[in-house]
Amino acid sequence: MRYKSQSVAYWYFAIAMVLFGLQLVFGLLSAAKYLGPDPLLNILPFDVTKTIHTNLLIVWVLTGFMGATYWMVPDESRTELYSTKLAYIQLGLWTVMGVTAVIGYLFGYGTGNKLLEQPLPHKIVIVICMLIFLYNIGMTIKKSGRFTTTEGVLLLGLGSAAVLYLPALLHYENYVVSIYYRWWTIHLWVEGVWEMIQGGFLAYLLIRLSGADREVMEKWLYVIVGLVFIAGIIGTAHHYYWIGVPTYWLPIGGLFSALEPVALVGMAMYAYYAMRRSGLAHPNKLALHWTIGSALFTMFGAGLLGLAHTFPSVNKWTHGTLITAMHGHAAFYGAYVMIVLAMITYAMPSITRRENVDGTNLGYWAFWLQLAGMFGMTLSFGTAGIGQVYLERILGMGYLDTQLKIQVHFLMLVATGSLFALGVGMFIYDFFRFPPRLSVGDSEPLPITTTSAARPGL
Amino acid sequence: MNKRQTRLFAVISTAIAAVAFLGMTLDTHRQFPALTHSENITPAVTRGKDVWHENNCINCHTIFGEGAYYAPDLTKISQHRGAPYLTAFLKDPSKFYDEKRHRRLMPQPNLNDQEISDLIAFFDWVANVDNQGWPPRPILVTGSSIPGTTLTVAQQDASGPGRTTDPMPPGARPVSGSDDPIALGEALFGTATPVCNACHSIAPGVNLAGPTLAGIATRALETIASPEYAGSADSVEAYIRESITKPSAYLHPGEMYSAGGTSFMPNNYAESLTDEQIDQLAAYLATFK
């Protein structure tokens, strides 16, 4: 840690870790309900646990993004943050928003609009938090006068994420129109600007970890951003299948979402190129695992598994089945969870009092258990989904009867989900067992802000 | 490419994509009224949409395939189930499905009559939105049309460990001998051992290892009246019964069906099926005039 104010990132990461743990509690609870009968049917039904599961994901991943940005921007712009006080106020407001929203869901408060369940006051607080955040980051960069491309891409991503949240605040009489604009927030976040954020972090990590040449890395970052948006913006069309919009969205959706993996493959190649070019010399090997892992798992979960059901002729049968859950889990994990965990792992040796730079044994266990668990969950959802598609959609067997036939996959889901939760538990424990380092101390094991690991101490 | 060119690529491609997307959005808005029949969005439909949102329905169910995957899709529910059924169901779902058997049950939604009728109005509007004909075949809540499983999985378990004499919701009630024998015969046709439909089709002209059973009732009367018939049947049902229990009593013409005066049909049905079951099969097959 070169700048004292970077320590605010620790508290963002800490909140993110707590909420991540909580997300899994509700995820496992939801998975168990697939096995049924549900003893909590009238206390905590599926709709509530599922809403909390997905909302906690959004809140903690965004908390992680913000923390990681507060970590990265001082590093990139070579200055202290404009205001740590503002950053803490923002975190406080944000956490209160997240926690009260979850408590509200427990008592049935929510808009009942998938992924945008936050009540209006909460939505307004979200916008306020984002504005504080963007102001603070913007002022930091302005103060320093040093604005890198990586920062620019990251900031544009975060800024657009705030702007794209606005359609979610509006109310539409026509349900079809409200679905249409819901995707402006959800899709353009997840398959547009969040990918930009991921790209920004990825570029930062690759430059730092591999010592790859900044000019080259940033050049390719632009290409990736271009590819993300060519496919991503019009690729929204694949959410417009079968919802009551003109038919031309079908071929357009097929074509442009088929292009979406190109950017993701690009990102994976980008990571591979950096490693080939500059080697794996950086001592923080665990952060390297998470970084490369994120690029590869994104290609698998978002790219390949998305492609698997994106053509209208396939999607007509798979739409609204567990196939979507398969893609959703793997894509979110690879692209967003792993990149946040990569940023945390990269910052860990200097943000906490951990002596070991390479990463602890527990950290490696957490990495591999999570990967194995999530891969197993993806397979469980996938096999359950394939069974569901054939029995229910193609052969015409009733929904409830089909669900009874695919119970074994839900057992597998709970088992692999538990494995995943174990990995996450280890990560969280590994994070909290070292107290935070709140000042720029001399005892830091290694100044990891140098561009080349071969020159420690610079 | 240098860095400036790649930046230009990013900016221009994003701009083109955004302009194309906004253009299509405008055109879509032009078509929304016709595609969604927006003139049918009555106050009741709007209130029903609010009921749908307030009760967080979308986090178990899907509409237009969007939502959660824990409960059935409801896009066309108002076409599959009438308003009286949906009203009764929404008043108390537990009367319709049994959580022990289906492992899932909708929690009591606690809606008043007005809310229920508004919600049904909303479903009715949804079902009529022009959404490119999705789903390509009906998505059923329960039941099945797979040959051999025409009764629900739960119902077929009539004699198994789940058997009970307690009153059960209709979707989970095991069958008993007092049910329609024709329906039970139809289920048996796909489940007896050896299974009848392995050798017999009910489609006209489709001869498998055994002759088609299409028109068997008419043919039975002709056979009984013909001089070659040496069996003891005097009615269609009796003839079918005899064919099942004593396959060689009358041999259907054709070298692939019999040899040396013995039918190729298995002759163990008299033991493996109960009298009641054979009656049910006869009742079912006698319907093919």
Image (cartoon, rainbow, N blue to C red):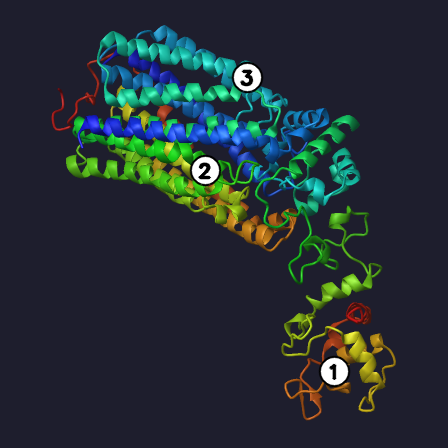
Which amino acid, by three-letter code, is at mark 1?
A: Pro
Q: CA distance from mark 3 to mark 2?
A: 25 Å
Residue at 23% of width from left, 11% of height from top?
Answer: A79
Asked if residue A122 is positioned above or below residue B2 in the image, the reply reads: above
Q: Observer-nearest residue: B100 or A213?
A: A213
Q: Secondary structure at mark 1?
A: helix
Do callouts 3 and 2 mark residues in contact (Cβ within 8 Å)?
no
Asked if residue B198 is positioned above or below residue A192 in the image, the reply reads: below
Tell me the residue that label 1 is attached to.
Answer: B247
Mark linked to residue A367 = none
Q: Secondary structure at mark 3?
A: helix
Do callouts 1 and 3 mark residues in contact (Cβ within 8 Å)?
no
- In the rendered structure, the answer to whether residue A166 lies left or right of residue B184 reads left
Residue A415 place in picture, x, y as percent:
49, 43
Q: Choose top left, top right, bottom left or bottom right for residue A348.
A: top left
Q: Choose top left, top right, bottom left or bottom right for residue B113.
A: top right
- Chain on which label 3 sits: A
Quick check: do tags 2 and 1 share a chain?
no
Q: Is residue B212 visible?
A: yes
Tell me the residue that label 2 is attached to.
Answer: A329
Residue at 78% of width from left, 40% of height from top?
Answer: B85
Tell me the residue that label 3 is attached to.
Answer: A100
Residue B270 place in picture, x, y as percent:
77, 77
Residue A40 place in picture, x, y as percent:
64, 33
Which amino acid, by three-letter code, is at mark 3?
A: Thr
User: Which class describes the residues within 10 Å of circle 3: few (<14), some (14-19), or many (20+)?
Assistant: some
Mark 3 vs 2, N-terminal side: 3
Asked if residue A444 is positioned above or below residue B182 in the image, the reply reads: above
